[in-house]
Amino acid sequence: MKPKFYPTYSSFPSSFFPLPSSFFLLPSSFFLLRVTMKILTDWGFTREGWRKNSRGEYLVLLQGGLLTGFVILPVYQLPGLKIQSTHLLYIIWFMASILGLTGLIFIIKALIDLGKNLTPLPYPIENGELVQTGIYGIVRHPLYSGLILATLGWTLFKMSLSHLIASALLIILFEIKANREEAWLTKKYPAYSEYRQRVKKLIPGIY
């Protein structure tokens, strides 16, 4: 006697129960949202902070806006500025590549050395520690240094006046943000004053 077969949901082809694609995207969207909120919380972002700018949240927004503007900014060169010498052009491109590559190395090494202490806020995370080794033994703000070098490299490569102005604005912002950050770091870490005297801020051995 053959056993009776009772159809189940899984025995039917999926075409019998068409589901919108958004049905499958919802769980992943909620998961990504929870992960994002967890990262922002670990970085020190809070609702009160956004309202009062108590941890430099507005500086982070301004930084994001300027970096986005730099990326989408059209290239503008001075009228009549055209390099005739091919050798000189190759030298300029080589220097621009060195700047960009050095900036990228600074950024990657800084992210690795920071590890769990990473936060885009100038305010240090609660359970962090003062990092003085690796790239942080060369400059105190290697992420800012790397971004500055990268933007200057692109500016030189394109010979763009508009990007030169944007780079200058970014340098001013990073100077302001670094000063705010160091005021908080000095309060939190007693060793920061000595570290500040020993290691330059943005340019190794110079500034």
Image: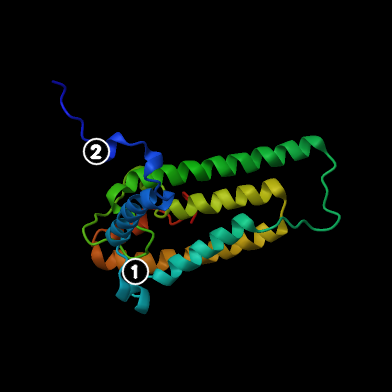
Q: Which amino acid, mark 2?
A: Thr
- Outermost left residue: 1
Q: Residue 176, can we see it? A: no
Q: Which amino acid, mark 1?
A: Ala
Mark 2 nearby-residue class (10 Å; few <14, some 14–19, many ≥20): few
Q: Secondary structure at mark 2?
A: loop
The percent position of residue 13, horizontal first and vertical second, equals 36, 36
2 or 7: nearer the eye?
A: 2
The percent position of residue 124, horizontal first and vertical second, equals 30, 62
Residue 135 appears left or right of 88: left
Total numbered labels placed on residues in the image: 2
The percent position of residue 47, horizontal first and vertical second, equals 31, 73
Residue 93 appears left or right of 120: right
Q: Residue 47, can we see it? A: yes
Residue ID for mark 1:
183
Viewer-nearest of labels 2 and 1?
2
Residue ID for mark 2:
8
Q: Secondary structure at mark 1?
A: helix
113 or 198: nearer the eye?
A: 113
Mark 1 nearby-residue class (10 Å; few <14, some 14–19, many ≥20): some
Query: Could you tell which of marks 2 and 1 lies nearer the N-terminus?
Result: 2
The percent position of residue 80, horizontal first and vertical second, equals 86, 55
- Outermost top residue: 1
Q: Which residue is found at the position 69% from the left and 60% from the top?
A: 162
**Quarter residue 195 falls in:** bottom left
Disc 2 versus disc 1: distance between alpha carbons?
66 Å
Q: Which residue is found at the position 37% from the left and 39% from the top?
A: 14
- Outermost bottom residue: 52
